[in-house]
Image (spheres, grey):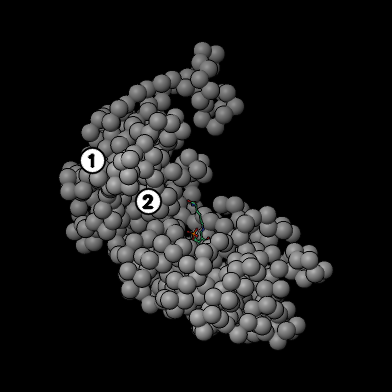
Amino acid sequence: MWASGVARNDAGELTLDGLAVSELQRQFGTPLFVMSENDFRARARAFSDAFNNAFADICGGVDVYYAGKSFLCTAVVRWVEEEGLRLDTASGGELAVAARAGIPGSDVALHGNNKSDGEIHRALDMKLGRIVVDSIAELERVARIAGNRGETAKVMLRLTPGVHAHTHEFIATAHEDQKFGLSMAGDSTEQAGLSAAEEAVAAASGHPSIELLGLHCHIGSQIFEPDGFALAAEKLLDFLAAMQSKYSIVLPELDLGGGYGIAYTPVDTPRPAAEIAQAMAAVVRTKCAELGISAPRISIEPGRAIVGSTTFTLYEVGTLKTVRVDAPGADGSKSGNSGETGKNVTYPRRYVSVDGGMSDNPRPVLYDADYSAILASRASAAAPQLSRVVGKHCESGDIVVRDVYLPEDVAAGDLLAVPGTGAYCWALSSNYNYLARPGVVAVRDGSARLIVRGETEEDLLNRDMGV
Ligand code: LLP
C-alpha cells in the first residue's frame, strides 16, 4: 500500500525518504499529494523488467506504455522516458503534456473513442508511434486526414474481445455492451458473419494513408487475476491468425492494455507483476504455437500499477464528531449505519473531518472504493476507535475512508496520511465547492519539489469572467 521509503522517525512521525510530514506541510500546505520519485521509477522498471523477461523468448520483449490518464505531468513523462517506458495518452491535452516534456512522438500512443479532427492532426504533427483507432468511422477520418496531409498514420485497432473484468473477477460475454472499440462478434455489421473488427482490418489495409500495426484490447481496471488478460490474448491471437489466413494480412503488434490491480487496503492481494507476466506469456506462447503463427510484438499499458502506490495524500484533521451506530449486520447493512438504535447493540463511530475530500479523491464516491488512513504527524498509544474519515464538502457522501481504526486521541491539527492515491485521484480531482486542487510534491533522496503546484484562490477566480 505504501511507497518504499515511507517510515516513522524516532519521534513517531511519518517520513518519506527521511522527510517528515510536518515539514512537508510547512513547505507546501495540505491537502497534498506526496509522491516518491524513486518508488515511481522502481515500479516502472519492475513492471517493464517482469514483462520483458517473461516475453523475451516469445517476441523479444514487451513495449510498456505508461497510461498517463492515471496521473500525468511533465516530470512524470520524463521519468517514464528515462526508465525506458513509452506513454499512452487519451486526449489532446495529454498530448500537450507529452509534447512539453519532449518525449519523442514515436514513443507515444493516442487513445480515445471520440477523437476530434484536431486531436488527429496533433497526433500526426507529433509523428505518434500509434493512433489506437476505436471505430470504423474514425478509421475513415484518420485515413482522410493523413491522406490530405500526404502522410501515413500508424494505427492499432481497438477490439472488444468480449472479456470484461470487474475488479477481482472477469466475465466473458458474447457482446461488449460498452462504448469502446470494434466488436469481434460475427453479427456486428450489416454484412452477415462479418464483425466490425474484421471490416476494419479489411478497410485499413485498403487505405494507402494507413499503416496497420496491429490490434489492441483493454478489458478493465484494478484486476488481480491473470485469467481475463489471458483469455483476451487468446481471442485476439485467434483473430490475428484468421486475418492472416483469410486476407494474408500479417499484423505485427498486439497490445493487451492495462488494468493490473494494486492494494488499497490490507485485504487486497494483487499478484506480483512477474506472476501475471509469466501467465500471460505462457498463454501467448502456447496459442501462437497452436495457430502456427509467429508471435506479434506485445505491448501493455499499465497506469495504476505503476503510480498508484507511489503516493499518499496528506490531510490535516479539523472537526471531530462521534455518533452511535448499530453493530455490523444488525440492520442488514455492511457497516450498520441505518440510524436505528435501541433494539440492537450499538457502538461509537467517530467522524474525522479533513481539509480535502471528494474534490481530491472522488473514487470512494464514484466506485465505492476503499482506502485506509493512519495518524501521520505523531505516534499514539491510545486505543483504536472506529472512525470514518470525511471531507469538507457539502455532501454527506463525501467520504475519504469509510471505516478505519484510528487512535482515539486523534485531534484537530493532527495530520492523516491516506496511501494508494497516486492513480485516478489528482487526475479526477475537481474544484467542487470552489476548493483549490492540491499540489503534487515529488520526494527524492530526502528532498521535495513541487511537480504540480496547488491551485490558488486566484486560479479559482481566473476563468470567471466577472460579467
Ligand atoms: N489502457 C486503456 C485503453 C485504458 O482505458 C486504461 C484505463 C488503461 C490502459 C490503464 O488502466 P490501469 O492500468 O490504470 O488500470 N477511473 C477509474 C479507472 C478508469 C480506467 C480507465 N482506463 C478508477 O479510478 O478506478
Residue 294 seen in the current view: yes
- The image position of residue 28, as x and y in percent, is 21, 48
- In the displayed structure, does residue 387 sit left or right of residue 368? left
* Mark 2, residue position: 426
- In the displayed structure, does residue 215 sit left or right of residue 108? right
Q: Where's the C terminus, which quadrant? A: top left
- The image position of residue 74, as x and y in percent, is 32, 65
Q: Residue at x 23, y 33 (%)?
A: 413
Q: Residue at x 65, y 69 (%)?
A: 136
- In the displayed structure, does residue 115 sit left or right of residue 24? right
Q: CA distance from mark 1 to mark 2?
A: 23 Å
- The image position of residue 228, as x and y in percent, is 62, 61
Q: Quadrant of residue 410?
A: top left
The kind of residue on which mark 2 rests is Trp
The kind of residue on which mark 1 rests is Ser
Q: Nearer the viewer, residue 245 or 193?
A: 193
Q: Residue at x 58, y 81 (%)?
A: 210
